[in-house]
Image: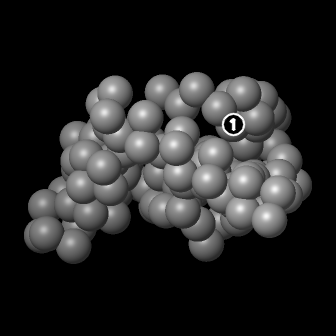
């Protein structure tokens, strides 16, 4: 689970729950499984561009609620997608934190 406080706040909103429900209603099957010729129910919604990569709250909101930034996935494909993105584990979290810090420095201190 994400540790970014803005993400945690956004993921708990009614707006997100309604969008998530809409995505899963319009895409009831896992999009990755379908590409591989399998049929699995989609039970999770994945942000293609991670919300935590944005620096400002408004940019995070844009990524969170952009329907073009969402994929309907089964749990296994969601976990696999995060592994492929290098977004799971302590090392990945440390790397993300360092990259985020560098983006803030580049934007505000240079």
Viewer-side residue, 30 vs 91: 91
Q: Position of residue 79 (x, y in %)?
A: 28, 41
Q: Quadrant of the C terminus?
A: bottom right
Crowd band around label 1 with a 10 angstrom C-alpha radius: few (<14), some (14–19), many (20+): some
**Is residue 104 visible in this depiction of the protein?**
yes
Q: Secondary structure at mark 1?
A: helix
Viewer-side residue, 33 vs 56: 56
Q: Is residue 65 above or below residue 82?
A: below
For image coordinates 47% across by 51% down, the residue present is 46
Q: Position of residue 54 (x, y in %)?
A: 70, 56
For image coordinates 25% across by 46% down, the residue present is 83
**Is residue 25 visible in this depiction of the protein?**
no
Instruction: Decide if residue 36 is on the left or right side of residue 6.
Output: left
Instruction: Decide if residue 18 is on the left or right side of residue 53.
Output: right
Instruction: Decide if residue 81 is on the left or right side of residue 65.
Output: left
Q: Position of residue 20 (x, y in %)?
A: 62, 46
For image coordinates 62% across by 53% down, the residue present is 102
Farthest residue, direction front? 110
For image coordinates 72% across by 63% down, the residue present is 106
Q: Position of residue 44 (x, y in %)?
A: 44, 42
Disc 1 designates what residue?
Answer: 7
Chosen colour scheme: one colour
């Amino acid at each position: 689970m994400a540790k970014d406080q803005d993400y945690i706040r956004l993921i708990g909103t009614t707006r997100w729950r309604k969008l998530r429900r809409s995505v899963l209603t319009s895409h009831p099957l896992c999009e990755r499984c379908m590409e591989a010729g399998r049929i699995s129910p989609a039970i999770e919604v994945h942000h293609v561009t991670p919300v935590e990569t944005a620096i400002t709250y408004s940019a995070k909101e844009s990524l969170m609620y952009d329907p073009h930034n969402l994929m309907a996935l089964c749990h296994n494909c969601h976990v696999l997608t995060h592994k492929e993105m290098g977004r799971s584990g302590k090392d990945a979290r440390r790397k993300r934190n360092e990259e985020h810090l560098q983006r803030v420095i580049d934007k505000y201190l240079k």
